[in-house]
Image: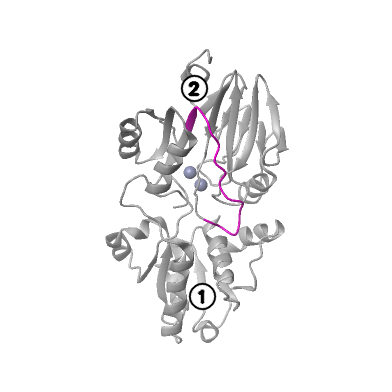
Amino acid sequence: MRPERFDSWLTVDGRGLYCRPGGFHIDPYHGAKRAVITHGHSDHARPGHEHVLATAETLAVMQTRLGTVATRGTQAVKYREKLQIGEVTVTLVPAGHVLGSAQVLIEWKGARVVVSGDYKRSADPTCPGFELLPCHLFITEATFALPVFQHGNAHEEVAKLLKSRAQFPERAHVVGVYNLGKCQRLIAVLREAGYERPIYLHGALQECCSLYETFGVRLGPLKPATGTAREEMKGEIVLAPPTAIADRWSRRLPEPVTAFASGWMRIRARARQQGIELPLVISDHADWNELTATIAETGAEEVWVTHGREDALLHHIQSTGRKGRALALIGREDEDQ
Ligand SMILES: [Zn+2]
Ligand SMILES: [Zn+2]
């Protein structure tokens, strides 16, 4: 029988979620003594911790993006490797979100807690798929936690992009993508669809692509968009950060068709507002159906909900007989959506 309530040993302090019997924070805000990091997005992986434990991929992402990982030491952990930290056992298991992303399984006195970080259930050729872990307490994200959010099938969305390209051979297609994860996933799905032409990249995207390649993700021929002649980019696919597609940067492209790969593109008004001609509903987060199915499949009796639209998901959780709680964590506005 489990002796203690979860919130007596998993607490939220000024640095974020803290596991008392393990003596570590998970994805802390800043300056933790010991941090376990689920993945490299900036709302989870922050600088300034003394010791950081994560997958080798996440450590490399942090090194690339932050220029530093920890002030004292790092520990790279393999998926499914069981570690004793203080009184608890910690295991990192694939979350299917981005390269290196992990759920953190914490076991203590017979209780199993899963901190899922960000996750998705749909296929992604750039990282191992989400693994379902039965647990008593499941801590879930809620980025797209409204029934209206139903992400597309990435291959079908990419087929729309390729169809538009065939229709407008004189125009460039510029696709807004987040720099860590979405960019590489879109490229990999294009390659799976048999597209082998060079893909042109905004300079801000190059570094993360190289990092993925270092870890064996095949991205095929990539070329810098900057410095390439306008003529050469006719009929080509160009990837850029979302902020660059609407600004001066994209004026260098021949009559660009503007696209954006994001879960937000399900909301047509939002796409129109942003001047997106070709919305592609591709997300690295779980959509409503994935969130509710995952919660049910874990068998968790209690669910804590972090960043996002908690209300609808909490209502759903309670209506299925589970205990739900909104976890107020600072600094959780998702970088990638
Ligand atoms: Zn993330
Ligand atoms: Zn996040």
Q: Which residue is mark 2?
A: 11
Relative to the observer, which residue lies in front, 150 or 118? 150
Q: Secondary structure at mark 1?
A: strand
Residue under the image location 56 percent in, 27 percent down = 112
Give the residues in magenta.
Answer: 123-138
Q: Please say whether residue 3 is one of the residues in the magenta stretch.
A: no
- Mark 2 surroundings within 10 Å by alpha-carbon count, few (fewer than 14), some (14 through 19), many (20 or more): some
Q: Main secondary structure of the magenta part?
A: loop
- Amino acid type indicated by mark 2: Thr
Colouring mode (rainbow / by chain / secondary structure / one colour)? one colour
**Residue at figure coordinates x 44%, y 48% from the top left:** 286
Of the two numbered discs 2 and 1 on the same chain, state the one appearing first in sequence.
Answer: 2
In the image, 231 versus 326, the foreground residue is 326
Q: Which residue is mark 1?
A: 237
**How many marks overall?**
2
Q: Is mark 2 within 8 Å of ligand 2?
A: no
Would you say the residues marked 2 and 1 are in contact, meaning their CB atoms lie under 8 Å apart? no
Residue 177 or residue 252, whichever sits in front: 177
Q: Position of residue 111 (x, y in %)?
A: 55, 22
Tell me where residue 232 appears, x and y as whole percent.
55, 85
In the rendered image, residue 189, in percent from the top left (x then y), is placed at 55, 66
